[in-house]
Structures are given as structure tokens and as C-alpha cells.
Image (tube, grey):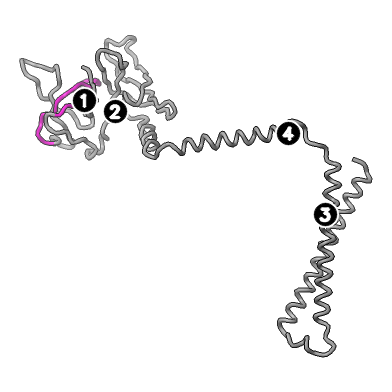
Amino acid sequence: MSSPDIAGILENSKDLDRLRKDQEEVLIEINKMHKKLQATPEVVEKTGDNSLSKLKFLYTQAKDLSETEVNVSSSLLSQLDALLPPGPPGQPRRRIEGSDQKRKRMKTDSEISRIPTNVRNQLEAYASLKGEQVAAKVTPDEADKDEWFVVKVLHFDKETREFEVLDEEPGDDDEGGGQRKYKLPVSSIIPFPKKNDPSSATDFPPRSQVLAVYPGTTALYKATVVNGHRKVIIPSTLVYLLEFDDDEEEGALPQRIVPFHKVVALPDGHRQ
């Protein structure tokens, strides 16, 4: 960029500033004339009054200044275009790629927003189980029988829709004997009723089959509701009276009391 080129740009910039100041002064005078004519419109009828001629002159001056500003601005733009180097070949492509990235983000957001509201609410409900105890089927689907234990939820992955859970009290026959973690699908998890909310207990009718924690253990087994009422009430808590399958003693199934927050509906296709 040569010095004369820069000087020409600077000169045109100064001309623009001057033109705008001149226009402001003319507009001020025009406004004064408007106020005068609005306040005393009869003045134009007086002999020798030149108010209208002066107003016409001001408008003509404003028009000339405006047209001159357009010409100077166009000249300045041409000077700048001639001096600016062309953009690198890859620049337009990078802009397109940036737009593509934006569209990808918008697409992802759109895909998330397209998830039905009831599904989003269900995913949030699963995520809220973190730290809670739930019933979990820890055996694979192809196993001969289903084994359900009480586990603690460590995390729920909304993308894979898997729970990470911890078996805090594994049985004596488990290898290692220590706490064990599992990653399980949603279909292998059943939330318990809230311990501090008896109203969350399910109303299981008599003779209905349920899955319940066997007293003194952290394992769940198939059981049958015995009591004819929804719940049996004992001091400070609500319980079910149940008969567990394969729990025969002296030729009869004992009836065992199980707190409502350790009883859930029997899953379809349960194998025991």
C-alpha cells in the first residue's frame, strides 16, 4: 500500500466527516424554520417574507450534501477494495465448514428436542435414582433363572440408557466376597416405592404375585399377597403379608411380613 493511496483514503474520510457536520447544521436550520412556520403560519402571507424561499434553499442544500456524501462514500469503498488483498483460497471453505459445524450442532439439538416429552421425563426419572436402592436383575437374559438383588444406583447414562449399580452386600457364594458393580439396561431395573412415602405403595390385590425382598436378605423372590387388604398396618410403618414360593416349612408356606418399600410388581416372564 503506497503513501498516496493512504493519503487519498484519509482525505475522503475527512470529507465525509465534514459533509456530515454540514448536514447536521442544515438540519438544525430546517427544524428551526419548521417550528417558526408551525407557530406562526400567517407570517408567510406578509409582504417581503422569505421564509418559504429560505426553507427551499435549505432543502436544496441538504439534498446536495447528501448526494455528495454518497459519491465520496462510493469513492472511498472503491479505494479500499483496490487496496485490500484477496482472501486466501481456503477461507470460503473454512466459513462453509464452520457453518456445517453449526448446522451439525443445530441438528443434534433438534434431535434431542424431538425426543418425546414423556421419554425425556422418564430419562430424568432414571437419572434421579442416583444413590437410591433399586431391584436389579443381575443375570443375563439367556440364563436359566432370574436373580434379583437390592443394589445401589451409582450412575445412569442417558445416551446408552444403562445403569451402573453396586451390589453392596454380595452373597457368600460370590467370588471374592467383596462389593460388585454391574452395568444393566433399563429393563433390568425396578425402582422401589419411596420409604418415606407410604402413598407410593402399589395396591396389590389378594393372591396377586409380586417380587419382594426376602426378610433378612438382599435378594428378591417371587411371592403371593396373602392379606385381603392393600396393606397391613403396624406401628409407624406399612407392610404386606406375603407367602414366598419355595419357602415351605413343615408342609406349609409361612406368611412373612415385608415392608411396602421392598415389594414391587412381578416382571413379565420371570423365571425362578
Q: Tell me which residue sits at (71%, 83%) in the image.
A: 39
Observer-side mark, 4 or 2, equals: 4
How far apart are the alpha carbons under marks 4 and 2? 55 Å
How far apart are the alpha carbons under marks 1 and 4? 65 Å
Q: Tell me which residue sits at (18%, 36%) in the image.
A: 203
Disc 4 marks a residue whose amino acid type is Gln
Q: Earlier in the sequence, mark 4 or mark 2?
A: 4
Q: Are marks 1 and 2 in contact (CB under 8 Å)?
A: yes
Relative to 61, say whether 71 is above or below. Answer: above
Tell me the residue that label 1 is attached to: 211
Observer-side mark, 1 or 4, equals: 4
The extreme right residue here reads 4
Tell me the residue that label 3 is attached to: 73
Q: Nearer the viewer, residue 15 or 149?
A: 15
Q: Are marks 3 and 4 in contact (CB under 8 Å)?
A: no
Asked if residue 225 lies in the magenta stretch, the reply is: yes
Q: Earlier in the sequence, mark 1 or mark 4?
A: 4
Instruction: Give the image quarter of residue 132.
Output: top left
Instruction: Give the image quarter of residue 149.
Output: top left
Estimate the x, y position of residue 245 in percent, counting from the top left.
Answer: 14, 19
Disc 1 marks a residue whose amino acid type is Leu
Q: Is residue 247 visible?
A: yes
Tell me the residue that label 4 is attached to: 91
* Local crowd size for mark 3, using a 10 Å CA cut-off: few (<14), some (14–19), many (≥20): some
Query: Which segment is the magenta one?
Result: 208-229
Q: Tell me which residue sits at (86%, 43%) in the image.
A: 82
Q: Which mark is residue 190?
A: 2
